[in-house]
Structure formats: C-alpha cells, structure tokens
Image (tube, rainbow, N blue to C red):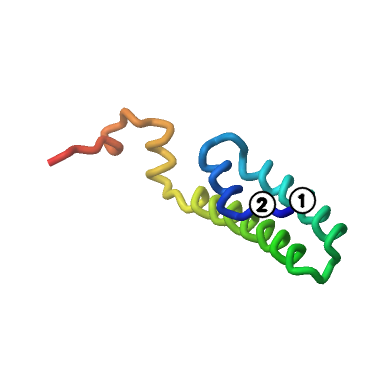
Amino acid sequence: MTKTLEVVQAAVNSGTKTLEQAILEAIVEARETCEIDGDNSAGCAVAWDIVEELQAEKAHQQQVKQRKTSLENYCDTHPEAIECLIYDV
C-alpha cells in the first residue's frame, strides 16, 4: 500500500530520513505497488506521483542552494567580516 505524500514529507522534515532516502524508498514502493495492483491501477499512478513530487522537491532545493550571491557565499565562510554584519535598528 502506498504512503501518502504528507507522511513522507513529515518524515523528511522531522529529520528521520533524508530526501534522497525517501525518494529511493518511494521508488521501491511504487514498483511493488504496480507489480501487485497492475501498471494501469490508480494505486500505481499515485505511487509514481509521490516519487515525482519528491524528485521535484529535491530539484527545487538544489536550485535554492545555487541562487546564493557572491556576497552570501563570502559571508558563509567569513561571518565576522564587516560586510556581513547585520544590525537591528
């Protein structure tokens, strides 16, 4: 039986498993579901939709990491630099 996407996301968000682990587990589960229920079943479609959603989330997270500016990268490695100080007014 397929897990719902919310259950998988909750496990990833809680830190019990990484997104990559969740994707691999979802692929195994999707294959099993399709083998049991048939390739044209609704359960099979839902299982592969979950895999697709997880892969899309992974791609989104990778894009966010790549969008850092040069200053952000510099401040990550040199947080004590004057350019990186943040003041509350």
**Residue assigned mark 2:** 3
Image spot of residue 66 (x, y percent): 52, 51
The residues bearing labels 1 and 2 have C-alpha atoms spaced at a distance of: 9 Å
- Residue at 42 percent across and 46 percent down: it is 70
Q: Is residue 80 left or right of residue 40?
A: left
Q: Residue furthest bottom?
A: 40
Tell me where residue 13 appears, x and y as whole percent: 52, 42
Name the secondary structure under disc 1: helix
Tell whether label 2 touches label 1 (CB within 8 Å): yes
Determine whether the residue tagged by mark 2 lies in a helix, strand or loop.
Answer: loop
Which image quarter: residue 55?
A: bottom right
Instruction: Give the class, few, some or many, for how many residues have Cα within 10 Å of label 1's Cα (few <14, many ≥20).
Output: some
User: How many numbered markers are drawn?
Assistant: 2
Identify the residue at image location x=47%, y=53%. Answer: 67
Write the residue at 24% across / 38% down.
Answer: 86
Mark 1 and mark 2 lie on one chain; the one further toward the N terminus is: 2
Residue at far left of view: 89
Q: Residue at x 59, y 34 (%)?
A: 16
Q: Which residue is mark 1?
A: 29
Compared to 16, does 25 lie above or below? below
Q: Nearer the viewer, residue 68 or 36?
A: 36
- The answer to which quarter of the image holds residue 76 is top left
Counting from the top left corner in percent of width and height, residue 42 is at: 74, 68
Q: Where in the figure is residue 40, as x and y percent of width and height?
A: 82, 71
